[in-house]
Image (cartoon, rainbow, N blue to C red):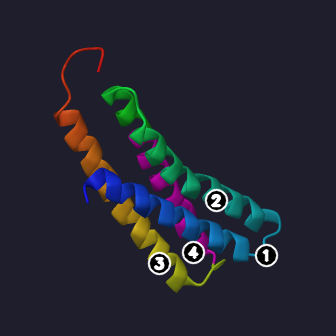
Amino acid sequence: MNKETGIVQRTYDFSVRIAKMCRAIDARGTDLVLVKQVMRSGTSIGANVEEAQGGHTRRDFVAKMSIAYKEARETKYWLKIMRDIEMVPAKKLEQLIDEGGQILKILASILLTTKSNSPKSPEE
């Protein structure tokens, strides 16, 4: 399994875990805002990775993977806040934070490799 194929499934699985966690939280007020934020950014990672697979150009692929990377960073941020205000048991959040960190590293590697292998022409 190559990095791109593996990251598609991994980010999909991460999105499912985020969605299940958010659905399980009985959120109101500020908690609801946090749930919406982490749901949006957490599921956006996989959506952008999936879109990148259909990119018409290398530049399009890099743009979508870069968005996925930024969304993964944002998701980690929201998860850490949720952990630190004790909104969800820390053990459950630590697993998601760790997985988010691993996804970040994979996305960074894919971006670095893709950019270093890119032709220097403006079309790509």
Secondary structure at badge 4 equals helix
Q: Is 12 rendered above or below residue 69?
A: below
Secondary structure at badge 3 equals helix
Say which of 45 and 101 sits in front: 45
Residue 85 shown left or right of residue 79 in the figure: right
The furthest residue to the right: 28
**Callout 3 touching callout 2 (CB < 8 Å):** no
- Residue 19, position as x, y percentages in the image: 63, 66
Q: Main secondary structure of the magenta part?
A: helix
Residue 116 shows in the view: yes
Rounded to the nearest whole Å, what is the CA distance between mark 3 and mark 2?
A: 17 Å
**Callout 3 touching callout 4 (CB < 8 Å):** no
**Which residue corresponds to mark 2?**
39
Rounded to the nearest whole Å, what is the CA distance between mark 4 and mark 1?
A: 18 Å
Which label's residue is closer to the chain start, 4 or 1? 1
Give the magenta-colored segment's residue range. Answer: 65-85
- Residue 87, position as x, y percentages in the image: 66, 77
- Residue 23, position as x, y percentages in the image: 71, 71
Residue at 57 percent across and 66 percent down: it is: 16
Q: Residues within 10 Å of mark 1 (few under 14, many from 20)?
A: few
Secondary structure at badge 1 equals loop
Q: Amino acid at mark 3?
A: Glu
Q: Residues within 10 Å of mark 3 (few under 14, many from 20)?
A: some
**Which residue corresponds to mark 1?**
26
- Considering the image in quadrants, where does the N terminus appear? bottom left
**Which residue corresponds to mark 4?**
84
Residue at 33 percent across and 59 percent down: it is: 6
Residue at 27 percent across and 54 percent down: it is: 3
Which label's residue is closer to the chain start, 3 or 4? 4
Q: Amino acid at mark 1?
A: Asp
